[in-house]
Image (cartoon, rainbow, N blue to C red):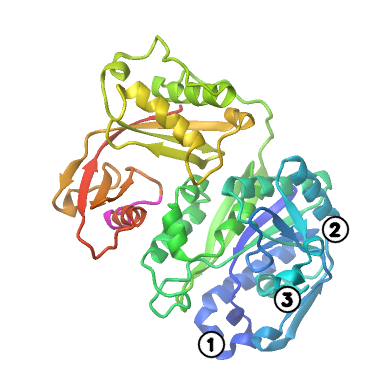
Amino acid sequence: MSVLSGYLMPHPPIMVEEVGGKEAQKVISSINAANTVGREIAKLSPDTIVIISPHGPIFADALCIYDFNLKGSLASFGAPEVKMSFERDAELADEVRERANRHGISTVTTSEVGVWKYGFKEELDHGVIVPMYFIAKYSSNFKLMPLSFGMLPYEDLYEFGKLIQESAKALNKKIVVIASGDLSHRLTKDAPAGYDPYGKVFEDQLVDALRKFDLKALRSIDPVVIERAGECGLRSIWIMAGTLDGCKVEPEVLSHEGPFGVGYCIARFKVAEQKEDSSETPEKETEDPYVKLARYTLETYVKEGVIPPLPEDLPEEMLKQRAGVFVSIKKGGQLRGCIGTFLPTRKNIAEEIQRNAISAGCEDPRFYPVEKDELPELEYSVDVLTEPVPVYSIDELDPKKYGILVRKGYKSGLLLPDLEGVDTVEQQLRIALAKAGIRLDEDYQIYKFEVERHEEK
């Protein structure tokens, strides 16, 4: 196996005794878990440790690989005696960059861009130093490949992780991957970034997804919740998850706490075995006609630039009934686009599916338009909505059964039912209100609806 294990580790300098002193006892759960990780990595004896930091040079369109002499300290946190240096794995870094270039994922090195021009010193940042402090206590017989993520789509970061795995395999190297990152910085009113109730919503959904290594649940976390949470670890996590692609993973959350209003989580993702690679895509079983129409429409539009005519063999209800429709598209278990209408805008359900399939694939502002080479990898689902009805008490709601629509004046926000990570009415309401830009303490109207969900089998 090229990847031995992945880990999520936080990086508050207060975890380091020389910095935190007695205050370090407030994060003792994290300290104990970090020491456990250090001992485990020593036993795994990797050739190289890959660590992804959110505190290095961050670029909008590229990942940055550190290629300076790997030295650093916690002098800026009052502990100059905590200093360390590592041997850089230039061979692995070069292989990763070459593969990324072939896949159209941009990378730069610190020397290429001259990071000093952006206010960065050529030394390891605390996003690297703090996790490595607990690893270097137990072993130093490894090379290091540190990098900082870019502000790329999650699917690109996941793909980059896969390329790290492929590179290690090609070079016959055993690696451990560390996602350095804190969770929400807005958990309490005295938190350094201020308080936001969505911090806890994010925290609960993320940790639950990590506990199960459920990437579908991870991808379904609402972007509004992510933004409001003020986190700095999610992109590191996506790269680490990509390095585990195709592996049988045994996940375990070793610790989770937030004593200073910032969430710290340490989790292990042990690789039990590598699944056999298969380059052939299995033939799809007979598709649900709703899903089949969504797929056919988007594929034709992307390849030919036209909306295809409706097939002649559609079920009668698709041609005679009208309803709101949402089309969701995923790639590798991650959301790739989702657009819909809660009330009908077209002549029938079939035309509603066609319009929203194109919108989900090509017009969702969160993603770039689907390209031809992606089409075989896409998975579709179609939700047909009942007409929304007013809700007069939250006792009438059930997030597993009903979707909700919230409204105040021109503002509105909709959330479909039975979403992974949305388990309570309170969570459902908070996310819908955040999407609408409506505060929790404002007056607003609530509507509920049911869906008939059509998915690939």
Tag 2: amino acid: Ala
- Is residue 21 shown above or below 391? below
- Is residue 291 shown above or below 407? above
Residue 135 colored magenta? no
Q: CA distance from mark 3 to mark 1?
A: 21 Å
Please, what secondary structure does the residue beneath circle 3 have? loop
Q: Residue at x 24, y 39 (%)?
A: 449
Residue at the left extreme, as displayed:
392
Comparing labels 3 and 2, the label whose residue is closer to the camera: 2
Tag 3: amino acid: Lys
Image coords of residue 215 (percent x, y): 52, 47
Residue matched to label 1: 23
**Sooner in the amino-acid sequence: mark 3 or mark 2:** 2
Is residue 44 visible in this depiction of the protein? Answer: no
Q: CA distance from mark 3 to mark 2?
A: 24 Å
Residue matched to label 3: 137
Residue 233 left/right relative to 289: right
Region in magenta: 421-428
Image coords of residue 209 (percent x, y): 48, 53
Residue 137 left/right relative to 457: right
Disc assigned to residue 90: 2
